[in-house]
């Protein structure tokens, strides 16, 4: 077991524990077969603050230092903890900074559940790849605040090295069979950073022999809104563009719960051995806490991304994605996707449907 990847489970706030319960059962099966080590659950975020007086307890940080990746439920509001006492984003930002998690990979699966829909779900998700550091997400030194009496300023800085790293990662995803092509979204008709972006991404794609199409970010938004690009594609874009495009794609797909997120450090670890945080993007959803109704699809997509990130478990990730797609096709669906007039599935029931599809196939591979 000493050479196995170690995964720390951090349920986090609100509905986090509810949505990671089903995926954690799959992790437990993988751990039982000796393919990974599993630790946790570890307290983190507003829920930890409410119990322990800190959102990042030292035992949790020690466990994360000693793991290869974190499987995270949600960061956000938690019942009984005032926002005046603890800002929940402090925990997730603190973890990203501690482990230099500078790249975001978001997976969005499309499912047709409208009144005329057939429930069909794409087996392979749309992937949005963006930076979490640099660009519009620069340091405090790139921002000039204002009290309202003068101009404010945000400086956007991208280096060739940052863009090259992102472009190489997009090509890796295609070569790994997780997508068939790349669409690069920029604003090269306006911004110098986007013109640099376009030049470098093209150079990297040419060198790797990977299909690449350029488009402006506003056109990309139009295509996503009209369902022209919803599967089997990597959307490669600058951080703030990708933040908006991924939420747009999730909304067009039918629910924000159809989006999983990976925040990763593609280089050597900077603190301990941890190189990634994998989570659904929907947050803690405090109004749904304890009701067992939230869609866990984003947590399954995050789990698939986690498994695919490491060579040792890469063959297991598609099993999770395909099982999720099968459960979305077959139904019943949770409240956010259930067609009118149908009874929605609970979080637990939908997770059981995914696991019933995934576990037999996982056992074949394990």
Image: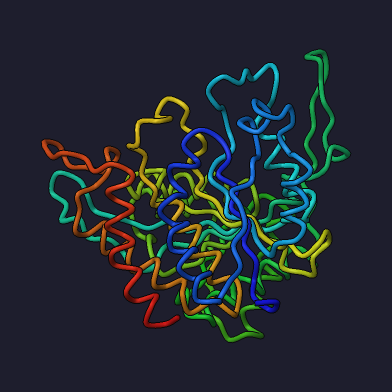
**Which quadrant is the N terminus positioned in?**
bottom right
Residue 8 % position (x, y): 63, 56
From this viewpoint, is residue 188 visible? no
Quick check: 259 left or right of 117? right
Residue at left offset 37%, top offset 48%:
225
Quick check: 120 left or right of 131? left
Relative to the observer, which residue lies in front, 10 or 169? Answer: 10
Image: 10 above or below 335? below
Relative to the observer, which residue lies in front, 273 or 115? Answer: 273
Q: Quadrant of residue 2?
A: bottom right
For this orientation, the residue located farthest to the right is 141
Relative to the observer, which residue lies in front, 29 or 289? Answer: 29
Residue at left offset 72%, top offset 46%:
60
From this viewpoint, is residue 239 visible? yes
**Which quadrant is the C terminus positioned in?**
bottom left
Residue at left offset 49%, top offset 71%:
30
Residue 242 % position (x, y): 57, 51
Residue 28 % position (x, y): 49, 63
Quick check: 272 left or right of 201? right
Residue at left offset 41%, top offset 48%:
250
Quick check: 157 left or right of 317? right
Q: Quadrant of residue 189?
A: bottom right
Image: 307 above or below 345? below
């Amino acid at each position: 077991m000493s050479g196995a990847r170690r995964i720390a489970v951090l349920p986090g706030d609100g509905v986090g524990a509810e949505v990671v319960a089903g995926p954690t059962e799959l992790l437990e099966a993988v751990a039982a077969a000796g393919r990974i080590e599993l630790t946790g659950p570890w307290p983190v975020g507003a829920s930890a603050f409410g119990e322990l007086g800190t959102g990042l307890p030292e035992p949790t940080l020690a466990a994360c230092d000693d793991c290869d990746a974190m499987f995270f439920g949600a960061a956000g509001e938690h019942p009984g903890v005032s926002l005046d006492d603890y800002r929940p984003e402090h925990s997730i930002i603190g973890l990203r900074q501690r482990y230099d998690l500078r790249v975001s990979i978001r997976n969005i699966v499309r499912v047709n559940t409208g009144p005329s829909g057939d429930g069909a779900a794409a087996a392979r998700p749309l992937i949005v790849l963006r930076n979490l550091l640099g660009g519009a997400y620069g340091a405090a030194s790139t921002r000039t605040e204002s009290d309202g009496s003068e101009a404010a300023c945000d400086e956007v800085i991208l280096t060739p090295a940052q863009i090259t790293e992102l472009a190489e990662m997009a090509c890796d995803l295609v070569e790994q069979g997780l997508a068939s092509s790349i669409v690069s979204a920029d604003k090269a008709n306006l911004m110098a950073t986007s013109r640099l972006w376009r030049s470098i991404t093209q150079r990297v794609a040419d060198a790797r022999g990977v299909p690449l199409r350029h488009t402006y970010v506003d056109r990309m938004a139009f295509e996503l809104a009209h369902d022209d690009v919803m599967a089997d594609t990597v959307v490669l874009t600058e951080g703030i563009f990708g933040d908006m495009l991924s939420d747009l794609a999730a909304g067009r797909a039918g629910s924000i719960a159809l989006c999983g997120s990976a925040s990763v450090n593609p280089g050597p670890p900077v603190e301990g051995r941890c190189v990634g945080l994998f989570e659904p993007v929907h947050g803690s959803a405090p109004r749904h806490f304890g009701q067992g109704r939230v869609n866990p699809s984003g947590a399954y997509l995050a789990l698939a991304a986690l498994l695919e990130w490491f060579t040792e478990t890469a063959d297991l990730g598609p099993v999770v994605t395909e099982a999720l797609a099968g459960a979305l096709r077959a139904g019943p669906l949770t409240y956010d996707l259930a067609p009118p007039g149908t009874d929605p599935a609970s979080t637990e029931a939908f997770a059981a449907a995914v696991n019933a599809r995934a576990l037999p196939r996982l056992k074949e591979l394990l």
